Image: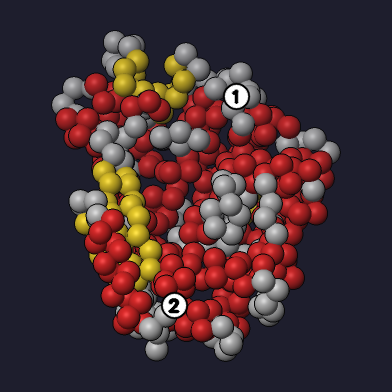
Amino acid sequence: MKSHKILNDPVYGFITIPSELIFNIIDHPFFQRLRRIKQLGLTDYVYPGALHTRFHHALGAMHLMSITLDQLRNKGTEISDEEYESALIAILLHDIGHGPFSHALEYSLLKGIPHERLSILAMEYLNQEFHGKLNLALRIFKDQYPRKFFHQLVSSQLDIDRLDYLQRDCFFTGVSEGTIGADRIIKMMAVKNDQVVIEEKGLYSIENFLSARRLMYWQVYLHKTTVSAEKMLINLIQRAKDLSSDGVDLGITANFDFLLKNEHSLNDFAQDQNLLKKFLQLDDFDIWGAVKQWCEHEDYVLRGISSMFLERRLFKIKLTNEPISEEEIEALGEKLIQKLNVPAADLRYFYSSGKVSNYGYLAKDRINILTKKGEVIDVAKAADLPNIRIMSKIVEKYYVCYAKNLN
């Protein structure tokens, strides 16, 4: 038996792999691939320590899920051994469908296909390999299991995914302001009427959790330098796609080349397991290898942006609280055409504009507080928490980013 194998995690210390099935899932090539996908994409351009991977995060989330389920059992919630193992598998595989650079390329490498949908397809593929042993984990992941609190632990505004990534991202970026009291939050969790609730005495831990998450978005996930780097990468991949469709040799790995040349729908991935396998062999190294190759490419766009990328000569970015008018965007575009000496048709590769948004709390996906009287109320309505009501507002910021030069 390979179960109860122990791993040493930098955030939590020792993590136990509790069953043979889970060990074999972790050992599978689909899961091992997550070692080669960084959790925070290009954030290490801002925070050099942010080199942790989706593999780290998935194992950490599984660990926190096991602690949470033990805590719920201790409070009298009946959880069978099958439910326990399946909940661990559901959280372990929740990010299995992520492509290279995580969110940065989610909607550019594959048009309109969110990673959650690919995660489901990957889990269904694994379920076949493991002879139906992931049936319950899939039902939990897809919110098809009658005991709804299991899905809430996997995906909600206060799920195990968020509890791990906030702690882990704080640890590796060094942004201590985003620290949350995950241990206390888990201890305050209970199940009432098949819903995850937080006991009233844990209320201020929830306020801190929501504040920390909001801060982490602006200070880390949506840091303007990270946004600039991601836009550069998206533009670079778009140029590669455009050249590939014209038959230009890009000198890249076979699977990367295949996915660049052909547009695929979610239905294509659902019907063709070989296509899914091609995608699930891609990782950050395919992209980095291509970028290094393209530094010598004859195409000036590929060559220019790739060189900038490797040397960290990032697009200049301006972030503002007010929308940027079309006139301003067009005027800046005209100046760039002259400054960079590029054809107007190619400006889009060196220039991007748009908006980013962040919220602390969405009332439609509520976090429930269990009062001392046994009532269940929304956290935003709890006493003395005006900050949460303020955080319910979606904050939007607008940006333009562009190449400063081509050399």
Residue 124 position, x and y percent, is 74, 40
- Looking at the rendered image, the quarter that the C terminus falls into is bottom left
Quarter of the image where one finds residue 19: top right
Query: Mark number for residue 259?
Result: none
**Vertical order, 240 against 139 (above or below):** below
Res 392 → quadrant: top left
Q: CA distance from mark 2 to mark 1?
A: 63 Å
Q: At x 42% / y 64%, what residue is drawn?
A: 231
Identify the image's colour scheme: rainbow, by chain, secondary structure or one colour.
secondary structure
Element assignment for label 1:
loop
Residue linked to disc 1: 79
> x, y (%) of residue 370?
34, 19
Q: Determine the residue positioned at 31% across, 21% down.
A: 378
Mark 1 neighbour density, 10 Å: few (under 14) some (14–19) many (20 or more): some
Dot 2 alpha-carbon crowd within 10 angstroms: few under 14, some 14 to 19, many 20 or more? few
Q: Is residue 371 left or right of residue 302?
A: left
Type of amino acid at the residue the image marks with label 2: Pro
Q: Position of residue 363 (x, y in %)?
A: 33, 27
Residue bearing mark 2: 343
Going by the image, does 374 lie left or right of 261? Answer: left
Question: Where does residue 46 sit, x and y in percent of width and height?
Answer: 34, 69
Measuring 66% from the left and 40% from the top, which residue is drawn there?
120
Q: Is residue 250 above or below residue 141?
A: below
Using the rendered image of the protein, determine whether residue 133 is visible from the camera's viewpoint: yes
